[in-house]
Image (cartoon, rainbow, N blue to C red):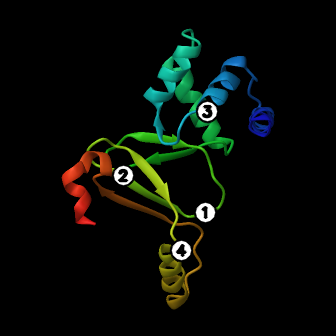
């Protein structure tokens, strides 16, 4: 948490923006949440801690966190914007439930091997990759869908 606060303060200084207690409180709360939160979900969590902080402040702060490299912003097929904490240079692969909108990140060496093979074959130098797979999560599939594996 200290490193993220330091990064935020440095970004604010470079951008010529004010350091505020609200921004730091929103960052602390955001970092304590599960990944793939919408602005509404983050704002609800923030309001539970400090009802004086409005949704627009949360939204502007999340955008600021993205600029500072403290959050990643995603626009999945359902049109909702979700935010997650950066987890390093690993590939970005996601399972998105079309029923409950739950998002799960995953890594798989086979997916990475296929990406690398395709890029080598086409002499392509990848900067990053992102895969999204849409379907139903285990909870939404229910007990009948569990035998289809």
Which residue is farthest left?
144
Q: To which residue does mark 3 refer?
A: 32
Mark 4–mark 1 distance (CA, rounded to whole Å): 11 Å
Which residue is farthest bottom?
121
Mark 1–mark 3 distance (CA, rounded to whole Å): 21 Å
Lower position in the chain sequence, tag 3 or tag 2? 3
Which of the two discs, 4 and 1, sits closer to the camera?
4
Mark 2 in CB contact with mark 1 (< 8 angstroms): no
Quadrant where the N terminus sits is top right
141 in relation to 107, above or below = above
x then y, percent, for residue 37: 47, 37
Residue 137 shows in this picture: no
Lower position in the chain sequence, tag 2 or tag 1? 1
For mark 1, give the secondary structure: loop
Lower position in the chain sequence, tag 4 or tag 1? 1
Quadrant where the C terminus sits is bottom left
x then y, percent, for residue 84: 55, 43
Residue shown at the point (28%, 48%) measured from the top left: 98
Residue 7 shows in this picture: yes
Q: To which residue does mark 1 refer?
A: 90
Mark 2–mark 1 distance (CA, rounded to whole Å): 18 Å
x then y, percent, for residue 143: 23, 50
Which of the two discs, 1 and 3, sits closer to the camera?
3
Q: To which residue does mark 4 refer?
A: 109
Q: For label 3, count other residues whose C-alpha is less than 10 Å away and answer few (under 14), some (14-19) or many (20+).
A: few
For mark 4, give the secondary structure: helix
Q: To which residue does mark 2 refer?
A: 96
Residue shown at the point (81%, 36%) measured from the top left: 6
């Amino acid at each position: 948490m200290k490193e993220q606060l330091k990064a935020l303060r440095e970004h604010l200084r470079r951008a010529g923006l004010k350091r505020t207690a609200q921004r730091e409180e929103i960052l602390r709360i955001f970092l304590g949440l599960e990944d793939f939160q919408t602005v509404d979900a983050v704002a609800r969590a923030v309001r539970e801690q400090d009802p004086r902080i409005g949704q627009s402040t949360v939204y502007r702060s999340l955008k600021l966190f993205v600029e500072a490299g403290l959050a990643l912003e995603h626009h999945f097929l359902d049109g909702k914007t979700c935010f997650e904490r950066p987890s390093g240079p690993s590939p970005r692969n996601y399972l998105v439930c079309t029923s409950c909108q739950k998002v799960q990140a995953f890594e798989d060496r086979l997916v990475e091997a296929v990406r690398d093979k395709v890029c080598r074959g086409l002499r392509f130098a990848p900067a990053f990759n992102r895969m999204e797979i849409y379907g139903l999560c285990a909870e939404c599939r229910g007990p009948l869908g569990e035998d289809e594996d």
